[in-house]
Amino acid sequence: MAALNVKINDIEFKNPILTASGTFGYGLEFADLVPLNQLGGIIVKGTTLHPRQGNKYPRMAETPHGMLNCVGLQNKGVDYFCSEIYPKIKDIDTHMIVNVSGNTPDDYAECAARIDALDKIPAIELNISCPNVKEGGMAFGVTCAGAAAVVKAVRRAYHKTLIVKLSPNVTDVAEIARACEAEGADSVSLINTLMGMAIDIERRKPVLSIATGGLSGPAVKPVALRMVWQVAKAVNIPVIGLGGISTAKDAIEFFMAGATAIQIGTANFVDPMATIHVRDGVNRWLDDHGCASVTEIIGALNV
């Protein structure tokens, strides 16, 4: 069998198949269905400094080849995570990574600092698609200045591997990635969801409670793949690819585009074992093509 281990900063992953935040809970919810120790890593649901109730229902809608969500980062806050969730997940035999969100750079930094103290959390993933409440609500991740401000604040407070999750709702994602790298990001992951909408034509109202939401699933894969390819050429830090990955073929495309690892998100709702099936499929493809390691195909796209 081909070697599947990859490295991001100082973390050695047993394989490059991770779960995407918000689609796999804290891992515990899937423990009866998926052998968690066979995953490269689990990125747990978004965590904020203070508890959040999330948006009103309905906040999920199925679309052709995808889904919309406006859950709104519902969670009980970082202190609850540290006291109640961390003890239950710290001994799972894979890398547990916490997705961190906030309203201000200081919020992000304080949340990250509290997670920094947890021995068995080797990395965090910053969700910079959150609105900057001090700057009129525009998402941090859509400008270089906004992205840089969050990464800079968190880098001062957090001393382990720092992954920054990039928004696709921008004009130049490579420029944003470079800004994050310049402020100390160890890796970038992309893409977060694309903004979308669905309308109930009988009621003449939006399907979602706040009208718009994040689009994920197979429909976004071509956009995600293009952005991963652009960013991988623009930065010198590892890129983690996500967006519509549900098969081994999808994952291999992302590796060839330059991703060191990939995340599986919406596919978990369709098939809880999607991560394992993708891992096994990647391994078979590598064996069939005479590759000794997955690293042989990372960035191997001929353009």
Image (cartoon, grey):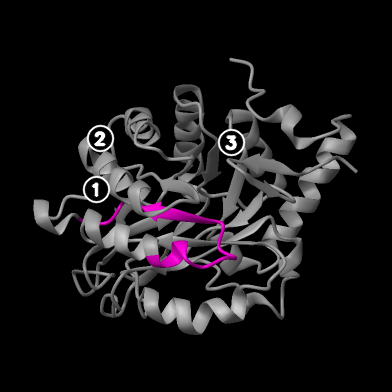
Position of the C terminus, as image quadrant, is top right
Percent of width and height locating residue 93: 72, 67
| Labelled pair 1, 2 in contact (Cβ < 8 Å) | no
Q: Residue at x 28, y 37 (%)?
A: 170
The picture places residue 137, in percent across and down from the top left corner, at 14, 55
State left or right for residue 294 relative to residue 134. right
Q: Range of the magenta residues?
A: 114-131
> Relative to 100, does residue 171 appear above or below in the rendering?
above
Q: Nearer the viewer, residue 227 or 119?
A: 119
Where is mark 3, residue-wise? 259
Nearer the camera: disc 3 or disc 2: 2
> Which disc is residue 300 wearing?
none
Q: Which residue is mark 2?
A: 144
Can residue 269 be found in the magenta stretch?
Answer: no
Q: Secondary structure at mark 3?
A: loop
Question: Is residue 137 visible to the viewer in this orientation of the structure?
Answer: yes
Classify residue 73 by image quadrant. bottom left
Residue at the (25%, 62%) spot, across then down: 107
What's under tag 2, amino acid-wise?
Cys
Give above or below for 14 relative to 100: above
Q: How far apart, in angstroms, are the residues tagged by discs 3 and 1?
A: 23 Å
- Residue to which mark 1 is pinned: 140
* Earlier-in-chain disc, 3 versus 1: 1
What SS does tag 1 mark? helix
- State left or right for residue 250 relative to residue 150: right
Q: Residue at x 46, y 26 (%)?
A: 235
